[in-house]
Amino acid sequence: MSEPRRATVVVIGAGQAGLSAAYHLQRRGFASALTEPAAARTYVVLDAAPAPGGAWQHRWPSLTMATVNGIFDLPGIRQPPVDDREQSRKAVPRYFAAYERELGLPILRPVHVTAVRRADDSPTGDLVIETDGGVWITRFVVNATGTWDNPVLPDHPGKDGFLGRQLHTRDYRSADEFAGQRVAIVGGGISAIQQLEEISRGATTFWYTRREPVFIEGEFMPETTGRETIAKVIADVEAGRPTGSVVGYTGLPWTPYARAAKARGALERRPMFTAIEPHGVREADGSFTPVDAILWATGFKASLVHLDPLGLRNELGGITMRGTQPLREPRVHLIGFGPSQSTIGANRAGREAVAAIARRLAAEDAGAPITDAAASVSFA
């Protein structure tokens, strides 16, 4: 087995949040741990994907730049002009790849992180990162793994006995696959509405949600609605409550595809079915609806299983946070998580995490005591 490699900071994930963190580390003078391992302050980015682009490279083909929910520029380099009709899974990864090349970011891929552990019981010691490409020893972890690898698939009664096709949003490719079929679409988020609108053009669709969807009347105002939403999410993470979906905080906007679905009569919500049977679903009123396929547009949760050895979660299943730091482990920063799930939020969180790390290192250099609130929490 090869010797562990070292870096002052290891960033896990090279999507919007991870690239933002890498940019700010570079700006603050952190050197590449790949080319200058003896430098005083170094960093590296470990990315599980074989190519740049984060989760964008996996989006369904019909998701164009005109229909994505806003892509904020990465720090330092603006997006080039792009055709609104171009697939987001091509345009965004191309931008990310150019960004990585221009800045010369130290990214290793594909590297899958399997676990992050404490080297010992000291609150100021090292963290050990286990990967399929060897072990890294680091002072700080900036986790930017997003949600794509952790789809939510409800364990609904009768699910395993269904004889038709079942798939999740992440498996969706084209509405053509469902032409002429009867399709149950489950979920009340933006992706569910997009896919409902597409599939309903050539198939008979049935839309199910657990709660009555709330549509936003009037224009979505980022400066007010966005600020209010972030405040609500921050209140949840600071209280240690698990965060919900974005639309659970904001409501659903009346996008062009939502209006198109409504005009076609596809935006007729049904209460969640009570059971799945071999050839269809049992409705809330007891009636039976035959379907050929079930699309679970039920969203994603943060992909954090590799952090489980650190015991970050509380009895509610949430992670109590102060800024980007879990209260139970100040050496870890979670970005692209909770209030920073949006692209603009990911940029800000990357900057905030790096600034906190820089302050911690400066305090150590000056011999000052650790002041992180999380440092006093027991690891037991």
Image (cartoon, helix red, strand yellow):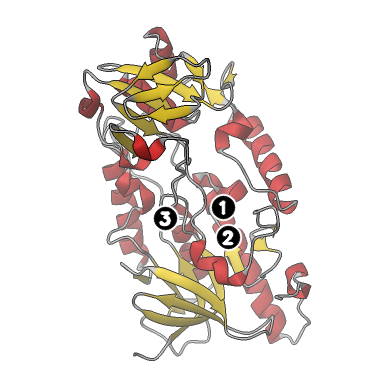
Q: Are marks 2 and 1 in contact (CB under 8 Å)?
A: yes
Circle 1 SS class? loop
Q: Position of residue 359 (x, y in %)?
A: 68, 72
Residue closer to the observer: 301 or 66: 301
Looking at the rendered structure, the kind of residue marked 2 is Leu
Quadrant placement of the C terminus: bottom right
Quarter of the figure with residue 131:
bottom left
Of marks 2 and 3, the one in the foreground: 2
Q: Residue at x 28, y 25 (%)?
A: 292
Q: Earlier in the sequence, mark 3 or mark 1?
A: 3
Q: Label 2, label 1: how many angstroms apart (C-alpha)? A: 6 Å
Instruction: Name the residue carrying label 1.
Output: 337
Drawn side of residue 297 relative to residue 86, left or right: right
Q: Are marks 3 and 1 in contact (CB under 8 Å)?
A: no
Q: Which mark is residue 334?
A: 2
Instruction: Name the residue carrying label 3.
Output: 15
Q: Residue at x 37, y 45 (%)?
A: 79
Q: Which mark is residue 3?
A: none
Q: Label 2, label 3: how many angstroms apart (C-alpha)? A: 13 Å
Q: Residue at x 70, y 40 (%)?
A: 232
Drawn side of residue 294 relative to residue 314, left or right: left
Circle 3 SS class? loop
Looking at the rendered structure, the kind of residue marked 1 is Phe
Q: Residue at x 33, y 29 (%)?
A: 278
Is residue 182 shown to the viewer in this render? yes
Circle 2 SS class? strand
Residue closer to the observer: 352 or 192: 192
Quick one: label 2, few (<14), some, or many (20+) residues within 10 Å? Answer: many
Q: Label 3, label 1: how many angstroms apart (C-alpha)? A: 12 Å
Q: Is residue 165 above or below residue 1?
A: above
Quadrant placement of the N terminus: bottom left
Looking at the rendered structure, the kind of residue marked 3 is Gly
